[in-house]
């Protein structure tokens, strides 16, 4: 049972349409109040700093656990001034 050539072209047209929609230009975002933007930027910066500290802490815990399991002695950390 052979499908007509028309039905062979339909999937290609659907894919082409989907690609066209994916590359469609998005509308410009609405204007933002500068005060609100600065506040949001400050909140995002604080959240990023908190995430970085949590990541560093978890990485330190992972390193300590690895060293403990492998029997590696920790080098003396230099004292902070």
Image (cartoon, rainbow, N blue to C red):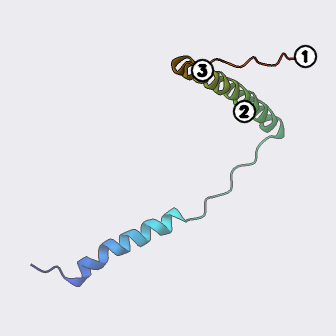
Measured in 3D between alpha carbons, the distance from the residue under mark 1 to the one under mark 2, in whole angstroms, is 31 Å
Q: For the residue labelled by badge 3, is the local secondary structure a helix, a strand or a loop?
A: loop
Label 3: how many Cα within 10 Å (few below 14, some 14–19, many 20+): few
What is the x, y in percent for residue 63? 60, 24
Q: Quadrant of residue 54?
A: top right
Tell me the residue that label 3 is attached to. Answer: 72
Left/right placement of residue 27 relative to residue 32 reads left
User: Residue 34 in the image: x percent, y percent?
Assistant: 83, 40
Q: Is residue 12 left or right of residue 19?
A: left
Where disc 1 sits, the SS reads loop
Label 2 neighbour load within 10 Å: few <14, some 14-19, many 20+: few
Which residue is the site of mark 2? 44
- Label 2 secondary element: helix
Of residue 27 and residue 15, the one placed in the foreground of this image is 15
| Sooner in the amino-acid sequence: mark 1 or mark 3 | 3
Residue 81's disc is: 1
Decide: is 27 above or below 41. Answer: below
Question: Hey, which quadrant is residue 76 in on the image?
Answer: top right
Is 39 positioned to the left or the right of 53 in the image? right
Residue at (64%, 22%) from the top-left corner? 60
């Amino acid at each position: 049972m052979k499908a007509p050539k028309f039905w062979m072209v339909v999937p290609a047209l659907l894919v082409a349409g989907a690609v066209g929609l994916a590359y469609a230009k998005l509308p410009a975002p609405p204007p933002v109040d500068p005060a609100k933007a600065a506040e949001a930027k400050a909140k995002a910066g604080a959240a990023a700093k908190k995430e970085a500290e949590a990541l560093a802490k978890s990485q330190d815990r992972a390193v300590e656990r690895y060293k403990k399991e492998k029997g590696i002695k920790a080098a003396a950390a230099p004292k902070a001034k």
